[in-house]
Image (cartoon, rainbow, N blue to C red):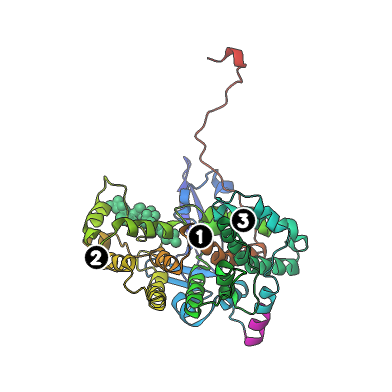
Amino acid sequence: MNTKNASLTVGKSKKNLEFPVYKGSEGPEVIDITSLYKESGFFTYDPGFMSTASCESSITYVDGEKGVLRYRGYDIAQLARKSNFMEVCYLLLHGELPAKKEFNLFVSEIKNRSLVHEQLQFLYRGFPRFSHPMAIMCGAFASLSAFYHDSLNINDEEQRRIAALRMIAKTPTLAAMAYKYSRGKPFIYPKNELDYTANFLHMLFAVPSEEYKVNKVLAKAMDTIFILHADHEQNASTSTVRLAGSSGANPFACISAGIASLWGPAHGGANEAVIHMLEEIGDIKNIPKFIKRAKDKDDPFRLMGFGHRVYKNYDPRASVLKDTCHEVLTELDMQNNSLLKIAMKLEDIALTDKYFIKRKLYPNVDFYSGIIYKAMGIPSNLYTVLFAIARTAGWVAQWKEMIEDPKQKIGRPRQLYTGHKPRNYVPVGKRK
Ligand code: ACO
């Protein structure tokens, strides 16, 4: 893949250095600067990874300018409309869509691992009832490494495979337990006759005293949301998983690190903010006031659910979710939902407003997911947990790809040091 070289002149001696340029199957070419420090004594400086490819990967491709997202070459809209989350998990992990037999085996291997160790309930009971479910998820996920010793050897291919299956299989169970615990309700065991997403809704909403029938439209909508959130190349949480895993750390702890990163409001927390914003707007007639505020540089208010660091076009996940949102609201007979009406009007206005057009601010995936969750009766502090369930598939696939890469090294960034130069220790009594 090395097509040409890039040259750089550095230092007082104006030394001319040549670096190989690599071309991937799609996307910008990259300059391999691995030898820069050895050859010149210089580091590169790129906080926030604005121009840095941190790894080689063949899992997910994003073209933000064109609004493209593909898993293993398959367009996200096609997968969302035609596939299902289990098939997408297989695709992310194995690189190809499964044949029927492979699919059935994969599904049964996941189902067989949907229970968590009984002892884990005591870990949950140690948390205050008012804990944020993401706090419980970080702790509970990391604790899996204490229960499943036979899948911790990352150098053993079969143990890696089992760890991957366990993580995807157990995340919904852990998430539903976090919710039930926060409500003081009994934990509901998985029901393996249901598929992955229906089973999650069952564990979330069923109570032992009553029969619970999973609504097929809602289960399908949740499955679509899981597909759309399953992976997004080297975002903050995925990079966290890779960096944690690069030291050889156990996979359960690495995914727990990813959950911690996802929790941040700049990453997984925006869908909750959309709902708060729509509630604050309250009525269509108030929209112009909020649009004006969003454009005002002296006002910190931003239109939540608009704009994206990578997408400078319509977020392809938002296009799919817009339809899903209508399906869910129709099913629940909530077409006249006032939040949706405000959301639609807001979208119309923003898409035709010069300020938003000039800055390429389009609705992102979070714009619709919050409305769907709210309609389903899911409390807002669980929204990021749902994101974590779906993204576990991507984290696990990316972690496996990294471990299986023969070029893999421990991740160790360097720095631009701006602290003190050497100075002598002063005993406490002599300090000013
Ligand atoms: N409302 C109003 N103006 C906005 C918005 C917005 N939502 N987003 C960006 N802008 C403006 C900025 O003020 C800036 O204007 P200027 O050029 O006049 O200074 C310009 O658009 C560029 O914005 P940046 O902040 O430089 O863009 P960046 O790529 O750093 O930010 C981000 C992306 C954080 C997503 C931003 O658009 C935002 O805050 N959006 C709202 C929060 C949100 O919906 N987040 C979810 C992202 S999707 C996800 O994480 C799954």
Rendered image quadrant of residue 193 = bottom right
Q: Indicate the amino acid at tag 2.
A: Ile
Judge left or right: residue 253 versus residue 7: right
Q: Which dot marks residue 349?
A: 2
Mark 3 or mark 2: whose residue is earlier in sequence:
3
* Start-end of magenta stretch: 99-106
Assess disc 3: are there few (<14), some (14-19) or many (≥20) residues with their C-alpha within 10 Å of its C-alpha: many
Instruction: Give the residue displayed 34% in from the left and 58% down from the top.
Output: 279
Judge left or right: residue 135 versus residue 271: right
Callout 2: SS: helix
> Vertical placement of 423 versus 151: above or below?
above
Callout 1: SS: helix
Q: Which dot marks residue 382?
A: 1
Check disc 3 and report the residue beneath it. 256
> Vertical placement of 214 versus 381: above or below?
below
Judge left or right: residue 314 versus residue 250: left
Where's residue 185, x and y in %? 59, 60
Outermost residue toward the right? 150
Where's residue 65, x and y in %? 37, 66
